[in-house]
Amino acid sequence: MPLIYVDTLEDPRLDAFARLTEAQLRSKLEPERALFIAESQKVIERAFEGGMEPISLLMEEKWLPSMAPLIERMEERAGGRAGAPEMPVFVAPHDELERLTGFELTRGALGAFRRPALPTVADVLHEARLVAVLEDITNHTNVGAIFRSAAALGVDAVLVSPACYDPLYRRAVRVSMGTVFQVPWTRIGDADVPNRPGCETWSEQGIPELHKHGFACAAMALSDDSMTPDELNGLLAEREAATGTPAKLALLFGTEGEGLSPATIARCDYTVRIPMAHGVDSLNVAASSAVAFYAFRRLSQLGRRPQ
């Protein structure tokens, strides 16, 4: 792969790193040209290991030795694709790279990758037993943190509503530590239909689709008729024993403040509330997701792996 030394971020070949907005990177009108940016060596490596196609890298010269093995692996994979163009590795001075917003958080390296086509909901749910559904979560940090917890706690897949923030937004990818490339995910619902207020929600078709694939749907919400995770675990275990069919559970999480929409809660099979002390009535959605994933771990990859 060619090393290309540049003196300034004004070089048009660095547009993806320095000038294109997230909306421009997504390039909905030309999806075959859509990109995302991975920040830091660890995240770049996880993106590559997750099968993402690298387009170019940008880094300080001092990071070349530590990045060399990964770059070599990228070269080997690209060499196996007939007609694949060489991937440039741009090297820029530190004082220029400092102009990039949040560059110090990138630990010196950035990668531009081809944005993959999303799989179908059916593909993502195949053989899954515990999945998370994110409705309208509009905080990139929370989206990334939920993916990190999902990966750590063995959640099989994540589904995101049309209005949920993009899991491949660079901050979400960074906060997830690249686990967004390890957990299968896709959108659920009609991306062209607004979610709220006063419009039909994704859940009108989405929850029946989850039911069709055998999933019970549990809304994580503050409700008078909610049950605890332990109570739902007991109910699911009883039904497994009675039917001989392994339980499948979709945990639904709503945006900060408003939570899940009333229509979504009404369509769910159960409402679950985490018991809390000291008069605290709610947790940040990223924190509550981690608690819920652990509470239902017997359904996850953690619970299914050999002892």
Image: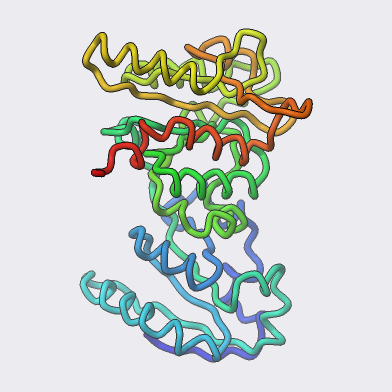
Image quarter for residue 51? bottom left
Q: Give whichever of 201, 133 is nearer the camera.
A: 133
Q: Give whichever of 144, 263 is nearer the camera.
A: 144
Q: Is residue 182 above or below residue 213?
A: below
Q: Position of residue 12 (x, y in %)?
A: 60, 77
Q: Position of residue 186 (x, y in %)?
A: 43, 39
Image quarter for residue 238? top left
Q: Residue furthest right?
A: 279
**Residue at the image position 67 percent from the left and 44 percent from the top:** 139
Q: Is residue 198 above or below residue 277?
A: above
Q: Is residue 199 above or below residue 93?
A: above
Residue 52 located left or right of residue 273? left
Q: Quadrant of the C terminus?
A: top left
**Residue at the image position 30 percent from the left and 36 percent from the top:** 123
Q: Give whichever of 239, 196 is nearer the camera.
A: 239
Q: Is residue 8 above or below residue 254?
A: below
Residue 133 located left or right of residue 282? left
Counting the numbered discs, the total is 0
**Residue at the image position 38 percent from the left and 17 percent from the top:** 236
Q: Give whichever of 181, 197 is nearer the camera.
A: 181
Residue 304 located left or right of residue 132? left
Q: Position of residue 206 (x, y in %)?
A: 45, 21
**Residue at the image position 74 percent from the left and 25 percent from the top:** 281
